[in-house]
Image (cartoon, grey):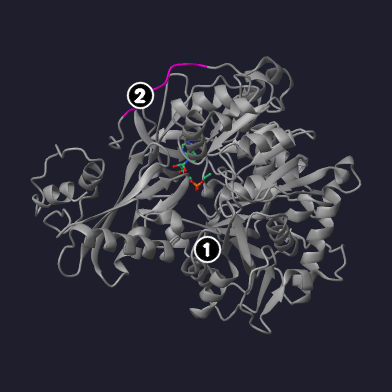
């Protein structure tokens, strides 16, 4: 059996972990790693039970580790009770951590605000008391649509404190996306801001929430709480709309955390899949929290004097695990940044690392690639110009990091003393799965190396048999793990079908192609489904196609990805219009109209880089669009494949010339 995934070129250089880290890291040396792996393999449940007992604070201890009776709907620590916010905040009270800075917030304009663990706890309690006072309670769903801010973390933590399930919508998504998610989760509460500031631009947020609510279908929403960030004018709906500063006024800074079952949903986060509709990935309180904390300690070697900075927005899973929950549970100081890496110039990241003495830095390959380009053309924003000596670990996430970007990052940011920690994981996995450990793993640029202890990752063929080393196949996880997706909100059938296809022996199917080398290292080869990765953001081709065909001018559309040096992949859309095919200036104008339309339907990140018009799309005789051929055309390469099964082979020439 083969999966059709071919092998890729493997980079051969190996970089050893720094001596100092090998000696002092939380997992020290290959022996330390192997010992944990052996423990997990001998008795997985005992391993996961030990970690959960030693690292989480339980209000009611669990007696069962894993309930597999309704697989693949696994339940971890099902009879245990705890509260996520108490595990991030209350547990530090009365310890030296309470006076430690929890968050260093740097605003778009450079202004810095610090908040200690104790003060953060008080702010979370006040806000939780406010929403409790409005009548919201455990089990309800809240949509959070906020800029990067201390308040965004407070809003998420306050929901967790009350057992309210949050669903964060990335601030770059459209009102239509908010609407879709609010309807799907049946939201009763929305938390937003008047606007967000990014790169000196002011982008309205509350307006988008108003628009979403005006679309109908979310009548269950009784309150919209707005944090005043920019001071811009907003529409006001009396009785429904409240200001953040008004609702917290006079609230007590003590709010007892609501104890919930370990499998009570902590959040629902929407992510793109291979159909038009994003899926609501549901995560459980206990397992998610455990793994976001353990990976802080293991992957990032978190220590109390660290200054951790994950540049991800809380709208993505990385911002859940490594901004809102993991760093607080680990009790480190973290940087939260409102702005963009290129404002006021492309040295912003490096200057912030210098100013805040960041020790662990975690960002996306797309940011590294674009900052490389800018630094190489403008020496004043080159990392060389800044003192980056505080750094000890530098991480990467979101997409494969190409060896060139890896080496640039390692040399110019890490000064060849900080290991590059290339973490493979997904919204569905909750936290890191396959990653080097800073004091353990010899690094190979472009490989996410080895699975974490307890994670049974493998590369298999179409019937779930492990493939030989050096051969490509499907990346699967063979045993359940605590931070795994519990279900797709409201669509358990889709959950089963997507992630646990019957032919794969009950393994979790990640949706990525991969191969392993002779040292067992994993090399991720990209998605096997119709999901694109644009600047580290997941985007379904079907999602963009649905948006395009919703436009009255469009008859048909097919969307594919084209490799791109900076963004990883770029969206290319092939479009058939109703009526005549546009040419010249008219084609340019229509393309612009359609790009803006997609931005409005989904968000600016989904805008096609290129739109090509044709009289038709390449189809088989049974009417199936041949996306495989469109990918070749999008790259600007000649089609050398056999096209004899095509109904209309001539269309390929037309689309190739339609640049
Ligand atoms: C890709 C982001 C290679 C992969 C945390 C995965 C990666 C998808 C890496 C998940 C990596 C993420 N190397 N590919 N280190 N990290 N990916 O859900 O295709 O936004 O399936 O989660 O990003 O994206 P998501």
Residue with the most extreme bottom position: 238
**Percent position of residue 403, x then y:** 45, 26
Residue depicted at 20% across the width and 45% down the height: 629
CA–CA distance between discs 1 and 2?
39 Å
**Percent position of residue 59, x then y:** 80, 55
Mark in the foreground, 1 or 2:
2
10 Å neighbourhood of mark 1: few (<14), some, or many (≥20)? Answer: some
Labels 1 and 2: the sequence-earlier one: 2
| SS majority, magenta | loop
* In the foreground, 274 or 366: 366
Magenta residue check for 633: no
| Residue 580 vertical placement versus 620 (above, below) | below
The residue pinned by badge 2 equals: 9
> Residue 489's mark?
1
| Residue 440 vertical placement versus 258 (above, below) | above
Q: Is residue 382 visible?
A: yes
**Over which residues does the magenta segment extend?**
7-14
């Amino acid at each position: 059996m083969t999966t059709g995934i071919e092998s890729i070129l493997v980079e051969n250089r190996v970089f050893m972990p720094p001596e100092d880290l090998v000696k002092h890291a939380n997992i020290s040396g290959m022996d330390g790693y192997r010992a944990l792996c052996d423990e997990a393999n001998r008795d997985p449940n005992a391993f996961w039970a030990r970690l959960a007992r030693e690292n989480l604070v339980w209000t009611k201890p669990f007696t069962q580790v894993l309930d597999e009776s309704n697989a693949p709907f696994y339940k971890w620590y099902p009879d245990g009770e705890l509260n996520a916010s108490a595990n991030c905040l209350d547990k530090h009270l009365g310890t030296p951590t309470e006076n430690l800075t929890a968050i260093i917030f740097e605003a778009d304009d450079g202004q810095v605000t610090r908040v200690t663990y104790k003060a953060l706890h008080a702010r979370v309690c006040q806000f939780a008391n406010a929403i409790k006072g409005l009548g919201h309670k455990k089990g309800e769903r809240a949509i959070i649509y906020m800029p990067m801010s201390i308040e965004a973390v407070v809003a998420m933590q306050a929901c967790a404190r009350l057992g309210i399930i949050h669903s964060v919508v990335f601030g770059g998504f459209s009102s239509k996306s908010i609407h879709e998610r609010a309807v799907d989760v049946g939201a009763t509460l929305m938390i937003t801001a008047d606007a967000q500031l990014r790169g000196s631009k002011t982008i309205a947020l509350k307006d988008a929430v108003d628009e979403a609510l005006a679309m109908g279908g979310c009548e269950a929403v009784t309150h919209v709480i707005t944090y005043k960030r920019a001071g811009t004018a907003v529409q006001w709906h009396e009785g429904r709309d409240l200001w953040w500063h008004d609702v917290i006024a006079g609230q007590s800074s003590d709010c007892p955390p609501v104890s919930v079952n370990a499998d009570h949903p902590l959040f629902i986060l929407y992510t793109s899949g291979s159909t038009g509709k994003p899926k609501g990935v549901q995560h459980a309180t206990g397992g998610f929290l455990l793994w976001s904390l353990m990976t802080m300690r293991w992957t990032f070697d978190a220590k109390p004097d660290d200054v951790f900075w994950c540049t991800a927005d809380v709208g993505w899973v990385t911002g859940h695990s490594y901004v809102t929950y993991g760093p607080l549970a680990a009790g480190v100081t973290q940087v939260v940044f409102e702005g963009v890496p290129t404002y006021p110039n492309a040295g912003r990241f490096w200057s912030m690392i210098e100013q805040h003495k960041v020790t662990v830095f975690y960002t996306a390959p797309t940011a590294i690639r674009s900052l490389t380009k800018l630094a190489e053309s403008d020496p004043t924003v080159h990392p060389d110009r800044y003192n980056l000596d505080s750094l000890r670990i530098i991480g990467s996430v979101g997409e494969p990091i190409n060896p060139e970007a890896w080496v640039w990052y390692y040399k110019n940011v890490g000064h060849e003393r900080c290991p590059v920690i290339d973490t493979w994981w997904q919204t569905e996995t909750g936290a890191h799965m396959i990653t080097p450990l800073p004091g353990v793993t010899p690094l190979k640029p472009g490989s996410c190396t080895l699975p974490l202890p307890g994670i049974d990752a493998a590369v298999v063929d179409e019937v779930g048999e492990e493939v030989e080393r050096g051969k490509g196949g499907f990346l699967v996880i063979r045993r359940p793990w605590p931070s795994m997706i519990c279900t797709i909100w409201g669509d358990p059938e889709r959950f089963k079908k997507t992630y646990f296809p019957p032919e794969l022996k009950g393994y979790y199917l990640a949706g990525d192609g991969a191969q392993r080398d002779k040292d067992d290292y994993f090399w991720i080869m990209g998605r096997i489904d119709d999901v694109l990765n644009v600047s580290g953001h997941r985007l379904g081709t079907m999602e963009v196609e649905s948006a395009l065909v919703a436009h009255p001018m469009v008859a048909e559309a097919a969307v594919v990805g084209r490799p791109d040096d900076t963004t990883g992949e770029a969206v290319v859309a092939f479009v058939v219009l109703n009526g005549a095919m546009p040419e010249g200036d008219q084609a340019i104008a229509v393309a612009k109209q359609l790009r803006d339309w997609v931005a409005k339907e989904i968000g600016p990140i989904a805008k096609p880089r290129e739109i090509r018009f044709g009289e038709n799309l390449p189809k088989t005789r049974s009417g199936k669009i041949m996306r495989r051929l469109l990918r070749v055309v999008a790259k600007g390469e000649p089609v050398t494949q056999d096209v004899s099964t095509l109904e209309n082979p001539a269309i390929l020439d037309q689309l190739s010339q339609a640049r």
